Amino acid sequence: MTAPADASAAAAPVLQIRGAALHRPQGRGDRELWSGLDLDVRPGEFIAVLGPSGSGKTTLLRSILGLQDLSAGEIRVAGVPATRGNPRIGYIPQQRPYPPDTAMRARDVIALGLQGRRFGLPVPRRGDRERVDEMLAEVGAAHYGDRRVGALSGGEQQRLRVGQALMDRPALLLCDEPLSNLDLANQQGVTEIIDRQRRAHGAAVLFVTHDINPILGRVDRILYIAGGRFMLGTPDEVLQTRVLTDLYGAPVFVLRAGDRLIVVGVPDVEPHHDHDHEGAA
Amino acid sequence: MSAVLGLLTAAGPVPAVNWGDIFSFADYGELVALLANSIIAGAVLGIVGGLVGVFVMQRDLAFAVHGVSELSFAGAAAALLFGGSVVAGSIGGALVAAILIGLLGARARERNSIVGVLMPFGLGLGILFLSLYDGRSANRFSLLTGQIVSVSSPDLGWLIGISAAVLVALVLVWNPLRFDSLDPVSAEARGVPTRTIGLVFMVLLGLIVAVAVHIIGALLVMALLVTPAAAAMRVTAGPLRVPLLAALFGFVSAVGGILLALAGTLPVSPYITTISFGIYVVCWLAQRARDRVRRAG
């Protein structure tokens, strides 16, 4: 149940979590979801966060974003305590379709990554257009940059969300189920963009997902939260029948089918629903 | 001036349509000069209403606009009955409704139920106040169906000033508001103060609705706060074109409606709503035609 020692202390961690605990209100008191979480994420590291819904994965991301407080513990991003609106963090949410009549073109969605926080006269600044063009090309959206977003496919829209999150060249990328609702080709495309970002710019990636397979070949470590406990280690260390059975306290099997992994027998801790954003308080 | 107003507002029972009531351009120049302030108020409201409408559409607030306007009507009616300023009353009612909806209705479903509860309450309250009020009867209906020519000069000044203030504030929060309207989850993650932005927008919406109640009437505010933006979104996308087109449509509807109404003896509102609706129909047809061409090509 211990994390492997961080071998290379060469680069200062982008994300540092110490003694984190999360409680959830229940009845009159509250119930501890988990506690004692320590995590150091180095630049360029790709960490997958797995676990059943309701295990506090989204809340963990929101705490790193400074939007919510942990029940205990400390979070530092690039050396400073977690705070709202930290420009060193990029956030990629789950794909949800934009309304068909949205008054924006593809390039406008990406431009919000630059302009979305600017109060005052909404005039684009020098260089904005070039940077948006560059990012459109980077996420493979250059050919539909001037089309209205409402008319684009889910995969095309999700590339724009990724581009928006990358506009500030963040040191830490938080991804909250960015591949759900996408087909296989788009899952690979979006994963590829995120992976290229960490290789080219050294961004660390914290990737919440319910399906490890699309990213299995790229993940350095896995944080698996379940049954009120967590396990941190390489995919080979964590994704084992023995380890997950111990974590869940119930028989769970990890099956290998070619290069795919299937986890069978995960007890439904809470009624399963698509993905809870509000509920993970 | 009062003779002119009497002529404009007193439409007696006429057996058949008298086209002279609808269009008559005698003394037109003098009328326009006399009512210059009303025309300016209509112009500013048309522009600002069109801009606000873009966010009303994107934030799915069309129904909330209706609820805010009914409470604004109740506030104005209360002011009429208890002898306060009608403009202040309408602003008070609109702000109470807008802030309540902003605080309690974060999600569309909750919001719709709150509006559904507030709207009949506000309308009923307003009708009660009007029934108890025994002043000039022309004022009664003007709050529901609008009659800009009966608004007094100092009040017109207030309406123009409030619209201008809303315009300035809207421009200052434009980008964060756009971000929050498109994707509140990402906006919050990037540090946009989404709760504050949402409330600021509701306050601006309340203010402009209160202005619209005086010009076009509580029952018809959507013609300037929803229709122009909806029409613009039919024919274009783009962060600059949609608001500019919506403002243009609002301006044409409001000013065109007032100018046409001056030529007859009928109220202003039907002219405004008809122009606004006509623009929407044209935009809708244009979109259909373009889609058909695109599919064929």
Image (cartoon, coloured by chain):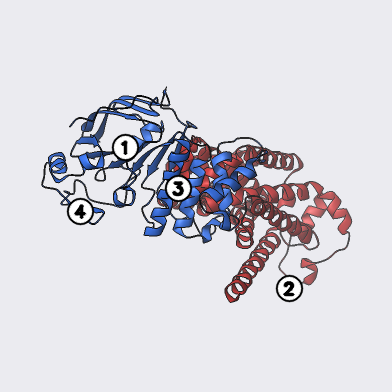
Chain assigned blue: A
The x, y position of residue B265, in whole percent, is 77, 62
Mark 2, Cα crowd under 10 Å, few <14 / some 14-19 / many 20+, is: few
Chain holding disc 1: A
Q: The residue tagged with tag 1: helix, strand or loop?
A: loop
Q: Vertically, is A116 above or below B18? A: above
The residue beneath circle 2 is B17
Give the Cα separation between the discs numbered 3 and 4.
27 Å
Mark 3 falls within which chain? A
Percent coordinates x, y for residue A245 in the rendering: 13, 43
Residue highlighted by disc 4: A256
Q: Secondary structure at mark 4?
A: strand
| Most foreground residue, A235 or B1 | A235
N-term mark: 3 or 4: 3
Identify residue type, mark 1: Ala
Decide: is B212 above or below A2: below
x, y percentage for residue B175?
59, 41
Task: Name the residue type under label 3.
Answer: Ile
Mark 1, mark 2: which one is toward the viewer?
Answer: 1
Do discs 1 and 2 belong to a common subunit? no
Q: Amino acid at mark 4?
A: Arg
Q: Chain of mark 4?
A: A
Quadrant for the N terminus of chain A, please.
Answer: top left
Can you tell which mark lies on residue A193?
3
Name the residue rendered at 83%, 66% in the picture: B24
Could you tell me if the residues under marks 3 and 4 are in contact, i.e. CB atoms within 8 Å?
no
